[in-house]
Amino acid sequence: MTAPTVPTTPRATGRGWLRPALRSRRFAAGLALLAVFVLTAALGPWLVGDPNAFTTDLGQAPSGAHWLGTTQTGQDVLAQLVVSARGTLLIGAASALIATVVSVVVGIGGGFLGGLADEALSLISNVFLVIPGLPLVIVVSAYVKGGGAWSTILVIALTSWAASARVLRAQTLSLRSRDYVLAARVYGEKRWRIVLVEILPNELAIIVSQFIFAVIFAILTQAGLAFLGLADPSHLTWGTMLYFAQNAEALTSGAWWWFIPPGLCIAALGTALSLISFGLDEVLDPRLRVRKVSA
Amino acid sequence: MTALDVQDLTVDFAQRGRVPFRAVDRVSFSLHAGRTLALVGESGSGKSTVVRALSRLVAPTAGEVRLGGARRTRGKEYRRAVQMVFQDPFASLNPAHTVGHHLIRPLLVGGRARRGADAEEKARELLRSVNLTPADDMAHKRPHELSGGQRQRVAIARALAPGPEVLLADEPVSMLDVSIRLEILGLLDRLKDERGLALLYVTHDLATARHFASEVMVMYRGEIVERGPSDEVILAPRHPYTQTLAAAAPSSAAGRERARAARAERLAARAGRDAERREAVVGDGCRFRPRCPYAMDVCTRRPPETEVGPGHRSLCWLRTDTNDSVVGFSA
């Protein structure tokens, strides 16, 4: 036999992380659940009728015509739920994105630059950290009420970035004196490349998990704000649905089909995101990644 | 040809509420193309700080570094010409990137390759030059898939990528398995010959220092206490610190005999010396005084550098006995 045998050892590639990730049952279940919500939010609004259209069926229990019943004013609960999914996910994702970007810039920037810049950025994040979140959100959102969804998004982002920034700063302080970062300095790598290419990828697991939890936090905060009547009521979310249900005394009148679906959706979405985060923890660490491939 | 000339390199580290700590004190030496200079000393003697100051990771407090005669330590040219191999191959490679990335980036930063196929081919060449084959396969691996020896080869290849003239190797084999140390040192030695590198080999292993370096410097508490041709310094050490260091190293049977005799002599000298002198606090004088078996009154003053053989110098009062004028001169 002279033919060279081709080594069949599996090789970890940058793109091949999804398959081992799906072996994690938690990740797969979370992803499936999230996919349902995302698809509903993306396509659902075209499949259901106008959520604000009034019918003559007032406060009806679930039936063939209205799968999830109707509200006190005769609107279809299912249509509202589907349209609300879009609004809720949008607010959750957008404010988490803004919060994550701010925390990455402040945390990694401060940790890497050190000195006066670090002191200043640390001071700002400490101030935002000790400000009690929900009262500030309530005050600010009461002040900017009427600004629509964007004011809610900005208010939530403003109050949720500081803790992540501190974690990232600590991690960056540890990473920036690692030998591989020093080695990049020795061969003359530019500073922004050191931050983005040498340091950032090693914090990706933290950033992704922080982003996911920021989404959960944003959705819960938004639901809380809306429930208290501090969000724009014309922008349909699960929170505003609960607000209207509460105002119409759905709870005391026993109209369970009105308040249980949005509440359940919020809980299920939170569960899905948590499952994804736990599953990703196993996947984003390159060392754990390969153990999965060769297993 | 002198590749790198270091004059009176001094590094101080600020300490909160105290006088700065002097990690490197007026160290001078030069590195020559195609030759290896070994820097030996115990932990904390300042060896790594010398390397870090030369690779500009630490700013020196004072001193002059000349690269090929020009006094330029800032800018791209110095970055390219002076490269470093780190001690710990498990920490010096980025776990997030492939081996290829570790080689392509310095090639691109140094302008030695064009983006794309050219850089990849040059990276494969580097891998082959450090005996990591098949190069194609290696370039796609990540650090955690490699053994310690393979990682250190990658680190060496990365240091070679910018095309340096000076290579600083900070204890390049101390974290590796004993069985592959010689291979890595042999590789460094071969690369030095092939590429005409000026190699600074930092170690605490006298045996490899003698084998691979033509000259040896012995460092203690930030000072060079003895320097000279490697055989001279290690086989016939003249400074008490080097003698202790040589005696501590495991060696052959004949060496052991000699070491035993030397040890008996040192113990006798130590017994003959009163306790209070042993306790003496280091002020301006010889730094080795508190541990030195031969400590004398005169050691409270800084010893002069004395020629004790051809090209062999030692920083000790013991070796100035034959030359009274030196004693009087540096008082």
Image: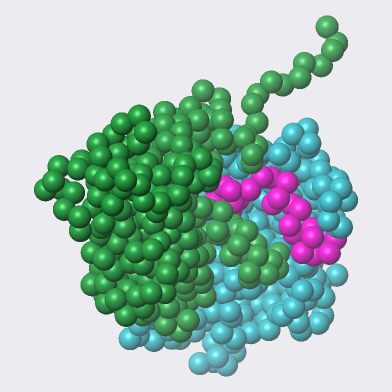
Chain colours: A green, B cyan
- Give the camera-side residue of A141 and B286: A141
> Does the magenta segment cover residue B101?
yes
Q: How many marks?
A: 0
* Residue B293 higher or lower than A281, as above or below: below
Q: Which residue does the image show at 59% across and 51% down from the upper left?
A: B94
Q: Which residue: 79% across, 58% down?
A: B107
Q: Position of residue A294 (x, y in %)?
A: 56, 25
- Residue at (24% x, 44% y) in the render: A59
In the rendered image, residue B53 lying in the magenta stretch gets the answer: no
Q: Where is residue B164 in the image (x, y as percent from the top left)?
A: 79, 63
Q: Tell me where the magenta segment starts and ends, as one range.
A: B90-112
Work out whether residue A166 or residue A228 is closer to the camera in this orientation and state it. Answer: A228
Foreground residue, A269 or B68? A269
Residue in view at x 84 percent, y 12 percent: A3
Along the horizontal axis of the image, is A257 left or right of B188? left
User: Please, is residue A265 above or below residue A117 in the view?
Assistant: above
In the image, residue A180 sits, relative to residue B178, either above or below, namely: below
